[in-house]
Image: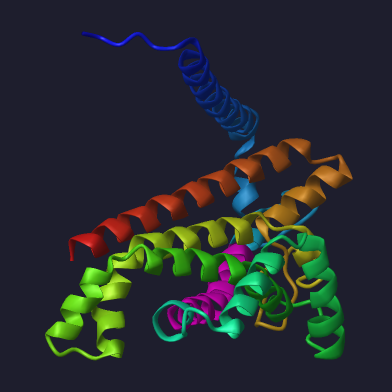
Amino acid sequence: MKMQAKPFDLLLRYLVWASAVITFGALIFLIGYIVIRGIPHLRPELFSFTYTADNVSMLPPLITTALMIVLALLIAAPLGIFTAIYLVEYAKKDNKLVKIVRVTAETLAGIPSIVYGLFGMLFFVVFMRWGYSLMSGGFTLAIMILPLIMRTTEESLKSVPDNFREGSFGLGAGRLRTVFKIVLPSAAPGILAGIILATGRIAGETAALIYTAGTMPRIPDNLFASGRTLSIHMFELSKEGFYINQAYATAVVLLILVVGINTLSAFIAKKIVKI
């Protein structure tokens, strides 16, 4: 006999459906609006190697964005992953240091990016005398995304069943071998998810980089040269008011970049799981 749903259960079900529809609709509207406004203005001159007032090329910012992503992840990913490994696999569960580190990481994750930008300007740009450069921006972004990578990695490691570890120990493997051969491959999809989120935050960051990396629309010659990312490029174009169409075109390229990174990371995660 089929049970009849209660009115409250039906209400909750409709609320869930409505929330899903509204969220999906807002996402489709946002993407569609950007694509419709930006694609007609994607022209060859926007991909010139040299930025001028006539072409307002986005190629230098695109290259700078890729360099910034690689630099920030090279600094933050190893630190975040290894810190999470220590907290989950090596530290005692009732360790006060572990609790302090977790509270600190959660606090850092909630700090506005403008605060990171001011810190990066005062410490890396002024105190370290790196100036407005990729190094200043990369280290600032690394500090900003470090809590995100650390927390997602920690949760991914916790989700690995203890039976995996016990089986490895039972076969005579040490803790280090167990972590790198058993635990990390099992937690790889979750770790990559955290890196994907961090990559998206780097690509879309503006406030922190204005104070640290600068706004020069050129391809940086070295790590201590200034440059602007796509998000800063889009902000500068829209702020001037003369290149609104080019700003929408830049938004389309930034959207494609983020979607491409997410797709590639998901593909890599599936390959790792199969292996």
> Where residue 60 appears, x then y in whole percent?
65, 62
| Quarter occupied by the N terminus | top left
Residue 68: tell me if it is visible.
no
Of residues 232 and 61, the one drawn nearer to the viewer in this rendering: 232
Q: Is residue 177 left or right of residue 122?
A: left
> Where residue 72 appears, x then y in whole percent?
59, 73
Against 176, residue 263 (above or below) is above
Q: Quadrant of residue 95?
A: bottom right
Spot the residue most to the left: 171
Please report the residue visible at 44 percent of the width from the left and 12 percent of the height from the top.
Answer: 6
Against 48, residue 239 (above or below) is above
Q: Is residue 136 magenta?
A: no
Q: Quadrant of residue 96?
A: bottom right
Q: Is residue 64 magenta?
A: yes
> Where residue 174 appears, x then y in whole percent?
24, 91
Please report the residue visible at 65 percent of the width from the left and 65 percent of the height from the top.
Answer: 106
Q: Is residue 202 left or right of residue 158?
A: right
| Quarter occupied by the C terminus | bottom left
In terms of secondary structure, what is the magenta stretch mainly?
helix
Please report the residue visible at 50 percent of the width from the left and 24 percent of the height from the top.
Answer: 16
Against 234, residue 76 (above or below) is below
Of residues 219 and 185, the one drawn nearer to the viewer in this rendering: 185
Give the colour scheme shown.
rainbow
Please report the residue visible at 76 percent of the width from the left and 63 percent of the height from the top.
Answer: 111
Of residues 153 and 169, the one drawn nearer to the viewer in this rendering: 169
The residue stretch that appears in magenta: 63-86
